[in-house]
C-alpha cells in the first residue's frame, strides 16, 4: 500500500510507501523538502499538514512542540502518512534537479586548520558528476551503516582539478568518525558518501540584503555560498557574522578578510564569546546572534542564513523573528546536530 503526498505551493507530488516517512520518500524521488538532521531533533523539516493524516515517530519537543502539532505542524522526517496528504512547505525546488548519489571518494589532503578542526579535500570519482547547491551537505556512510553529515565548503564552480570537495570537520572526542579523522586517517584513503542533501542554499530569486550567520564549523556552507555569490556576480548586500570562542577558532579568518576586500558588497564581522588576554582581541565580543541584533534592530527587509550549533540557530530564529521583525519565511538554517544532540529528550 502507498499514499500520494502533494507539496504546496510547488504543486509537486510523490508517492510514500507503507511505514515510510514522508521525508525519506521525498529524498528517494528527488523532491526537495526542507530538512536538516533527519532524526527529529532540529525542526528544519517542519511543514504544515493541509490535508490528510499522519502518525509521528519519536522526536524532540524542541523540534515540534505539542502546541505546534495541535496547530497542524508536522516533522516530515518523522511523519508516516496514514492517508493521501497535502503539505505546505516553502522553498521546494523542482523535482529531480540534482540527484542524490552514492559514491567513493579519495582523501587528497588533511589540513589541521585549528587544534580541533580538520579541513578534508576529497577527490570525486571521474565517472560521476556530483551536482549540488552551495550550502548543501553530504553524508559519510560508515562500515557499520552509521552516517555522519558534513557541509560542503566549496561552491560547485570551485571543485578544481582533479574535482574535489572540501569539508570542515570538528573533532568530537570519542566520536566514531572524528576520532578516525584526527587519528588514523591517511591521504589516499577511500571513503563512501552520499549527497547532495539538505535545503540550506541561497535563494537567488530574491534581491533582499543577506545576513550570513555562522558559529564554529558552521562557517563551511557559508563559505560555499560566498564563493557562489562572488563567481556568479551576485551583488546583493551581504554581511557575514562568524562567532567562535577564541581567536584561534576563527580558522579561516584570513580567507574572510580577503573575501571582504574582493567583494565590495560583503562586510565581515568576527565575534568572540570567550576571548582571553592572549588573544589580544579588540573586535566584537559576546553571542554572535546578539551582535547581529545590535547592528540590525530591524531585519524586516532581510534574508538570514544561519548555520552552526542548535543553541545558536534556535536563539537566532526566535529573537530575530520576535524582536527584529524578520519574516519567519526568510530565516533559513542548517543546525549542526551532533549524535549527542539527537538523543536528547523525545516526545
Image (cartoon, grey):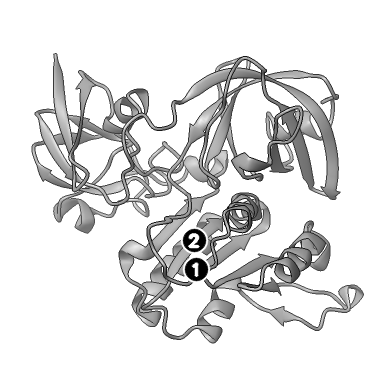
Q: Nearer the viewer, residue 19 or 331?
A: 331
Of the 4 image quadrants, the one containing the C terminus is top left
Q: Is residue 22 above or below residue 64?
A: above
Q: Residue at x 56, y 30 (%)?
A: 139
Q: Nearer the viewer, residue 172 or 137?
A: 137
Residue plotted at (28% across, 51% down): 90
Look at the numbered disc 2 and give the secondary structure of its residue.
Answer: strand
- The residue pinned by badge 2 equals 305
On screen, residue 87 versus residue 44, left or right, reads left
Q: Separation of disc 2 and disc 1 at Cα? A: 8 Å
**What SS does tag 1 mark?**
strand
Q: Residue furthest front?
A: 233
2 or 1: mark nearer the eye = 1
Label 1 Cα neighbours within 10 Å, binned few <14 / some 14-19 / many ≥20: many
Q: Do the numbered discs 2 and 1 sit on residues whose CB atoms are within 8 Å?
A: yes
Q: Which residue is mark 1?
A: 210
The answer to whether residue 245 is seen in the rendering is no
Near-viewer residue (207 or 331): 207
Horizontal and vertical percent position of residue 9: 19, 48
187 shown above or below 196: above
The answer, for residue 325, to whether it is visible in the render is yes
Amino acid at each position: 500500500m502507498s499514499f500520494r503526498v502533494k507539496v504546496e505551493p510547488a504543486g509537486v507530488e510523490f508517492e510514500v510507501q507503507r511505514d515510510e516517512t514522508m521525508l525519506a520518500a521525498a529524498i528517494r524521488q528527488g523532491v526537495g523538502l526542507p530538512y536538516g538532521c533527519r532524526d527529529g531533533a532540529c525542526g528544519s523539516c517542519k511543514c504544515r499538514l493541509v490535508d490528510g493524516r499522519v502518525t509521528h515517530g519519536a522526536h524532540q519537543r524542541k523540534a515540534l512542540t505539542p502546541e505546534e502539532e495541535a496547530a497542524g505542524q508536522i516533522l516530515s522526517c518523522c511523519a508516516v502518512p496514514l492517508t493521501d496528504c497535502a503539505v505546505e512547505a516553502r522553498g521546494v525546488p523542482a523535482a529531480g534537479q540534482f540527484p542524490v548519489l552514492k559514491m567513493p571518494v579519495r582523501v587528497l589532503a588533511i589540513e589541521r586548520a585549528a587544534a580541533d578542526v580538520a579541513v578534508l579535500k576529497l577527490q570525486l570519482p571521474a565517472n560521476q558528476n556530483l551536482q549540488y547547491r552551495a550550502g548543501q551537505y553530504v553524508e559519510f556512510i560508515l562500515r557499520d551503516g552509521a552516517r555522519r553529515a558534513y557541509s560542503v565548503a566549496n561552491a560547485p564552480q570551485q571543485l578544481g582539478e582533479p574535482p574535489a570537495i572540501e569539508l570542515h570537520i570538528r573533532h568530537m572526542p570519542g566520536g566514531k568518525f572524528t576520532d578516525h579523522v584526527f587519528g588514523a586517517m591517511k591521504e589516499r584513503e577511500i571513503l563512501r558518501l552520499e549527497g547532495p542533501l539538505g535545503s540550506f542554499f541561497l535563494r537567488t530569486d530574491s534581491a533582499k540584503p543577506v545576513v550570513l550567520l555562522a558559529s564554529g564549523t558552521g562557517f563551511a556552507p557559508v563559505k560555499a555560498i560566498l564563493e557562489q555569490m562572488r563567481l556568479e556576480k551576485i551583488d546583493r548586500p551581504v554581511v557575514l557574522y562568524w562567532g567562535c570562542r577564541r581567536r584561534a577558532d576563527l580558522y579561516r579568518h584570513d580567507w574572510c578578510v580577503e573575501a571582504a576586500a574582493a567583494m565590495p558588497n560583503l562586510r565581515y564581522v568576527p565575534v568572540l564569546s570567550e576571548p582571553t588576554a592572549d588573544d589580544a582581541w579588540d573586535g566584537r565580543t559576546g553571542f554572535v546572534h546578539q551582535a547581529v541584533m545590535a547592528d540590525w534592530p530591524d531585519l524586516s527587509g532581510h534574508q538570514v542564513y544561519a548555520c552552526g550549533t542548535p543553541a545558536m540557530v534556535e536563539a537566532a530564529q526566535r529573537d530575530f523573528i520576535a524582536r527584529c521583525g524578520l519574516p519567519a519565511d526568510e530565516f533559513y538554517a542548517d543546525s549542526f546536530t551532533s549524535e549527542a544532540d539527537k538523543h536528547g529528550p523525545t516526545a
